Image (cartoon, grey):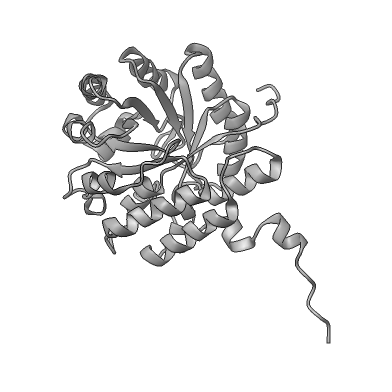
Amino acid sequence: MSRLPPPPASIRVVEVGLRDGLQAVLDPVLSTTDKVEVVRLLIDAGVREIEAVSFAHPKVLPQLADAEALMAAVPRVPGVRYRGLVPNEIGARRAVETGLDEIVLVVSADDEVSVRNQGRTVSDMLVELEGVSRLVEHSESDLLVGVACAFFAPARGPVPWAETLRVVDAAVDVGAAGLYLAATSGMEHPYELAEGLVRVRERHPHLRLGSHLHNRNGFAMANALAAMSAGVDWLETSFGGLGGDMWFPGHPDVLGNAPTEDLVHLCDTVGVDTGIDLARYREVVDFVARLTGRPSVSFVCRGGTRDELASAAWPEQS
C-alpha cells in the first residue's frame, strides 16, 4: 500500500464505554444515578459523542436494563450527541421513543460470529436491518450501521472483502446516515484497516464513516493513526479500555476496546484536536474504575504522559 498521508487537524471521538464497556461488567450492576454522573464527567472533559445505552433484552444485559431511565436522566447539552445500540426491531421500537440522536445496529460481516453473537446469520441480520431502518426513518434519529469483523474474524482469519462490502452496501441501500468498520477481533493491522476505509470512502464518497477500535494485539493506536490518515470521520473507544471482545479467548489484560485516554494522548502528541481535556478525562477513568472495580489497562494511566515524564526529577542518589 502507498504511503499514508498525515493525520487530520481534528478527529471526532465517540465514547462507547457506557455501552460497549459496561456490558462486559456483570457485577456490580451500576445504578442509573452513577451512570448519569459518568455522563456528566465525560461532558465536563469535552466528550461530545456518547454511546450511552443498549436496547438488548434486560435478561441478556442486566447492566444495561435501564436504557429508557438513563436517557430520560442524562443532561441535554447543546452539541452533545447520544447514541444507542439496538439488536433488532424490538429494540428499535424502544429506542426511537427516547430522543436518541443516533441509533446503531451492528451486523457482522462474518457469518459464524453473527450466529454465535446474535443468534442469526448475516442474511437474517440484513433483513432485520431493513425493518430497523423503516422504524428509524419515521423518528428524529439517524441510523448508523456497525460492521463487525469487517477485517478479521476469530477462528477464521481475514474476512474476504466481498463479505464486508455486502454489509456496507446493504447499509447504504436502506439509507443509513453512516457506518463504521469495526476491528472486532483486535488482530487487525494498520494497512488493512486503512485500505478498507479508503475503499469504502471511494465506493460511497458521501457516507459518514468511522472505525471502532480494539486492542488485543497492541496495534490500536497504530490503527487509529492509519484510520485518521485514511480519512475516517470518527473513532470509537472506551474509558479504560473497558469491554469489547471479552467473549473471545485470551488474557483479560489484552482483550477489549482501545482506551479513549490513550487515543486522546496520541492525538495531543501528534497535534490532532479531539476537544477532550486529557487530565479531566482521566478523572472519568478513575471514577469508573472505582465503580466497577476494574482499573484502566491504558498505557497513559499506567505510564503517564510525555509531559509528565519530561518534568519528572531523577531521585537523589545517596
Task: Determine whether, in the image, residue 308 is placed left or right of residue 35.
Answer: right
At 59% across and 43% down in the image, what residue appears?
A: 221
Q: Tell me where residue 68 sits by quadrant.
A: top left
Residue 188, image x and y in percent? Answer: 52, 37
Residue 245, image x and y in percent? Answer: 39, 46
Residue 204, image x and y in percent? Answer: 47, 13
Decide: is 59 above or below 190: below
Decide: is 271 above or below 300: above
**Visible residue check, residue 39:** yes
Residue 305, image x and y in percent? Answer: 67, 57
Q: How many marks?
A: 0
**Visible residue check, residue 242:** no
Task: Determine whether, in the image, residue 118 is placed left or right of residue 193.
Answer: left
At 39% across and 50% down in the image, what residue appears?
A: 39
Residue placed farthest to the right in the image?
318
At 63% across and 61% down in the image, what residue appears?
A: 303
* Placement of the C terminus among the 4 image quadrants: bottom right
At 78% across and 71% down in the image, what residue appears?
A: 313
